[in-house]
């Protein structure tokens, strides 16, 4: 099957003749290297200029991703290969994304629900504690102290 | 020149039971299939390596999330200029590695050997710089986790946060650069083996998938450093 004009099939290994191996022209190698050097200078330059913390991480990762894309497409030759290899590589990135989303999602929202204040169990415990404290106060103070406060119905 | 690829007709003659050039394993139909199988395996390994390092990067993300000021302060103890030099060295080594593969594609044995030598040289320069960085840190007591023993006041940091946890930062630093460094060392070893094979004339335009696959590994090592450098050395 062909997709985007290139082969995409998992039987890449099963086929007979592959297409003639694509040799990239020499200037392309040096061009990619020059671009990578420029992007390195940009990375350092942006950090020296200084940005607010969140933005600086985003920009640093964005520039690094552009460099990574160049390396993967051209040095690793993925641009000219059977699309199945791209599929394998991109799917690993997808799972990394999933990994980060779930883990950092948990990390960032810890303490969002504070168990001590937000559950029925805690609320019931407070009621019982109040009742006990009142009963204790009533028995310690001279008899005839105000009866214990009416216990509110436990609510969910 | 490296040995030119042999056509089926040539190698069939006079070889009993041998169905292709001597570098074609008997269980493959032809070189195209053999090469594609090799490349498929290697790309699966690349996917694994990405996932492997993603765990370490997540560790960095969690550390930085909980101790942002620590990361900001402690990174001053890393020399970003050395890191930048290492970045350029690795980028150049990626170039020479890609050129080595291209040389194999064009049957240029001498160029394969030259480019592999350059790549090995760059890798060694990287490790030497890494050695200086590490030994400087050991000397100062900037060690991971509970082994951190430097006197914080004498480090000359511009600002020390109240919840300074340098052990966390250096734990992340040493694990990430250490795992990466081990990959570079293993890479150097493999490259020496490939260099010997290239010198022997093993590689030609039809049979160079070992070189190509190693190239993938080496570019991945470079990729990881491309991400490590700004995240560890350029925290501002």
Image (spheres, coloured by chain):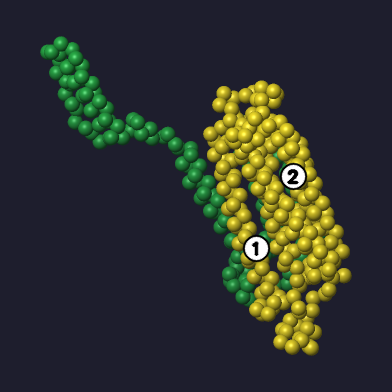
Task: Answer whether residue B92 is visible to the viewer in this image.
Answer: no
Question: Within the image, what quadrant is residue A59 found in?
Answer: top right
Q: Which residue is mark 2?
A: B87
Q: Secondary structure at mark 1?
A: helix
Residue ID at (59%, 70%):
A9
A4 or B144, which lies in front? Answer: B144
- Which image quarter is the C terminus of chain A in? top left
B184 or B62, which lies in front? Answer: B184
Residue B42's disc number? 1
Residue ID at (69%, 57%):
B217
- Which image quarter is the N terminus of chain A in? bottom right
Question: Within the image, what quadrant is residue A141 found in?
Answer: top left
Task: Answer whether residue B10 is visible to the viewer in this image.
Answer: yes
Depicted A123 relative to depicted B50: above or below: above
**Chain A: drawing colour:** green
B94 or A6, which lies in front? Answer: B94
In screen coordinates, is B142 left or right of B96? left
Q: CA distance from mark 1 to mark 2?
A: 24 Å
| Chain label for disc 1 | B
Q: Are marks 1 and 2 in contact (CB under 8 Å)?
A: no
Judged from this view, the residue extending furthest toward the left is: A144
**Chain B: drawing colour:** yellow
Does label 1 or label 2 sit earlier along the sequence?
Answer: 1
Give coordinates of residue B223: x percent, y percent: 68, 50
């Amino acid at each position: 099957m062909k997709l985007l004009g290139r082969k995409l099939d998992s039987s890449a290994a099963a086929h007979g003749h592959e297409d003639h191996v694509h040799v990239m022209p020499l200037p392309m190698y040096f061009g990619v290297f020059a671009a990578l050097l420029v992007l390195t200078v940009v990375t350092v330059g942006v950090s020296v200029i200084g940005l607010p913390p969140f933005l600086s991480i985003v920009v640093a990762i964005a520039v690094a991703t552009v460099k990574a894309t160049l390396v993967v497409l051209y040095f690793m030759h993925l641009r000219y290969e059977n699309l199945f290899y791209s599929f394998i590589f991109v799917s690993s990135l997808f799972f990394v994304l999933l990994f980060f989303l779930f883990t950092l999602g948990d990390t960032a929202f810890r303490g969002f629900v504070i168990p001590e204040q937000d559950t029925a169990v805690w609320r019931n415990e407070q009621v019982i504690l109040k009742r006990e404290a009142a009963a204790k106060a009533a028995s310690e103070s001279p008899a005839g102290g105000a009866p214990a406060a009416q216990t509110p119905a436990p609510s969910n | 020149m490296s040995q030119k690829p042999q056509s089926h007709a040539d190698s069939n003659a006079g070889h009993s039971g041998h169905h292709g050039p001597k570098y074609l394993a008997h269980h493959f139909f032809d070189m195209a299939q053999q090469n594609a199988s090799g490349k498929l395996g290697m790309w699966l390994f690349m996917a694994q390596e990405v996932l492997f390092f993603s765990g370490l990067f997540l560790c960095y993300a969690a550390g930085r999330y909980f101790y942002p000021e620590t990361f900001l302060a402690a990174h001053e103890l890393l020399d970003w200029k050395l890191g930048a030099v290492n970045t350029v060295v690795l980028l150049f080594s990626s170039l020479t590695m890609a050129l080595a593969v291209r040389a194999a594609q064009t049957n240029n044995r001498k160029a394969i050997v030259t480019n592999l030598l350059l790549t090995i040289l760059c890798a060694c320069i990287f490790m030497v710089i890494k050695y200086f960085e590490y030994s400087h840190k050991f000397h100062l007591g900037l060690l991971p986790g509970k082994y951190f023993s430097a006197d914080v006041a004498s480090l000359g940091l511009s600002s020390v946060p109240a919840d300074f946890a340098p052990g966390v930062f250096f734990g992340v630093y040493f694990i990430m650069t250490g795992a990466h460094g081990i990959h570079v060392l293993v890479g150097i070893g493999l490259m020496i083996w490939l260099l010997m094979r290239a010198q022997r004339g093993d590689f030609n335009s039809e049979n160079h998938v070992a070189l190509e696959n190693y190239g993938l590994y080496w570019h991945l090592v470079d990729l990881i450093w491309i991400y490590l450098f700004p995240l560890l050395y350029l925290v501002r």
